[in-house]
Image (cartoon, rainbow, N blue to C red):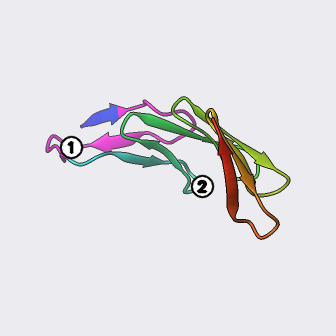
Amino acid sequence: MNTTYSCPNRNAQFRSKTFNRGVQVIRDRYGKVRCIGNVFINYDRYVKLNRVSSIYMKYKRSDILTQVGGLRVKFNHLGEIIHTYG
């Protein structure tokens, strides 16, 4: 059996000698997805996405996404996208 330790904050995963050719999805002990293939996923303390690989996300107030990487998003009062920058 092989053991992999490639993602932070997760339990060890054991694989047998038969290889599955699909993409490996790794979850932490709370059930959050931490890794998809070789892409790492980080969350903030409110369980919102903070970073996927090298792309950062910013939120305004509680759950309004305002920036994804270099793309800034502006919403109206109904939550609809009205303009994007970048």
Q: Residue sitting at 51 percent across and 33 percent down?
A: 53
Question: Does the magenta portion include 55?
Answer: no
Is the residue marked by circle 1 packed among few (<14), some (14-19), or many (20+) residues within 10 Å? Answer: few
The total of numbered circles placed on residues is: 2
**Magenta region, residue range:** 4-21
Q: Residue sitting at 19 percent across and 47 percent down?
A: 20
| Amino acid type, mark 1 | Ser
Q: Are marks 1 and 2 in contact (CB under 8 Å)?
A: no
Placement of 78 over or under 23, stated as above or below: below
**Majority secondary structure of magenta residues:** loop
For residue 2, say whether it is visible.
Answer: yes
Q: Nearer the viewer, mark 1 or mark 2?
A: 2
Is the residue marked by circle 2 packed among few (<14), some (14-19), or many (20+) residues within 10 Å? Answer: few
Q: CA distance from mark 1 to mark 2?
A: 24 Å
Q: Which mark is residue 78?
A: none
Residue 29, given in percent of the width and then of the height, sits at 56, 51
Q: Residue sitting at 67 percent across and 59 percent down?
A: 81
Label 2 residue SS: loop
Label whose residue precedes the other's in the sequence (1 or 2): 1
Residue 76, quarter of the rendered image: bottom right
